[in-house]
Amino acid sequence: MSRRHGRSHAGSAEGPGAPGQRSPGRVTLLDLSDETGFKPLSDVTEADDSVRIRLELPGVPTASVQVRVRGDCVEVSGEKLPDFPQGEASYLCLERIFGRFRRVFEVVGAVNLSQVSARLRDGILEVSIPKVRERRGRERSIPVTEG
């Protein structure tokens, strides 16, 4: 948990064994999800060309999943419905979780949020966020207009 935000880091520029160290060009990803209800488990990986968020969504149909980009955030939401019709019988044991879910990941770094793609296969949703080459240190002229 981040003490400053009260949120967990789904992935960060701080890799295991490198506390407090940031590498240039790395992406920081904060999990801004609600802490209540059904929360699909996720893994976040970073490669040279992309950041990938994988969420476990077994039994959730593709039509029930929405992926949105809002500002610097990637939001995954949907609903996992019970596969047993209500009223036919009573549960003796209910361990699986059903209901609405929402995961929000803030992506900070050199990524192209206009090119995000998502694929649901075998109960795993993979959201791919392509990286862009960092432009830090490049010089460019900014035109000044009159008026």
Image (cartoon, rainbow, N blue to C red):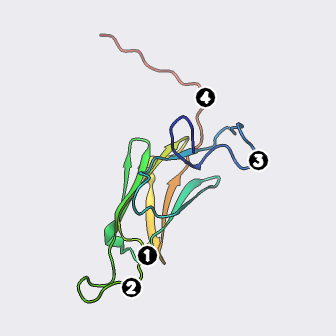
Question: Which amino acid lies under the numbered mark 2 shown in the image of this protein?
Answer: Leu
Callout 1: few (<14), some (14-19), or many (20+) C-alpha neighbours within 10 Å?
Answer: few
Q: Position of residue 17 (x, y in %)?
A: 76, 47
Q: Position of residue 137 (x, y in %)?
A: 63, 28
Q: Are marks 1 and 3 in contact (CB under 8 Å)?
A: no
Q: Is residue 79 left or right of residue 14?
A: left
Residue drawn at point x = 64 percent, y = 41 percent: 25
Q: Position of residue 89 (x, y in %)?
A: 28, 89
| Residue carrying label 3 | 17
Q: Nearer the viewer, mark 2 or mark 1?
A: 2
Taking the view exactly as shown, the residue that stands out farthest to the left is 87
Q: Are marks 4 and 2 in contact (CB under 8 Å)?
A: no
Circle 4: element type:
loop
| Residue carrying label 4 | 138
Q: Nearer the viewer, residue 113 or 12?
A: 12
Residue drawn at point x = 55 percent, y = 40 percent: 109
Q: Earlier in the sequence, mark 1 or mark 3?
A: 3
The residues bearing labels 4 and 2 have C-alpha atoms spaced at a distance of 64 Å
For the C terminus, give its image quadrant: top left
Q: Earlier in the sequence, mark 4 or mark 3?
A: 3
Question: Which amino acid lies under the numbered mark 3 shown in the image of this protein?
Answer: Gly
| Residue carrying label 1 | 96
Q: Nearer the viewer, mark 1 or mark 4?
A: 1
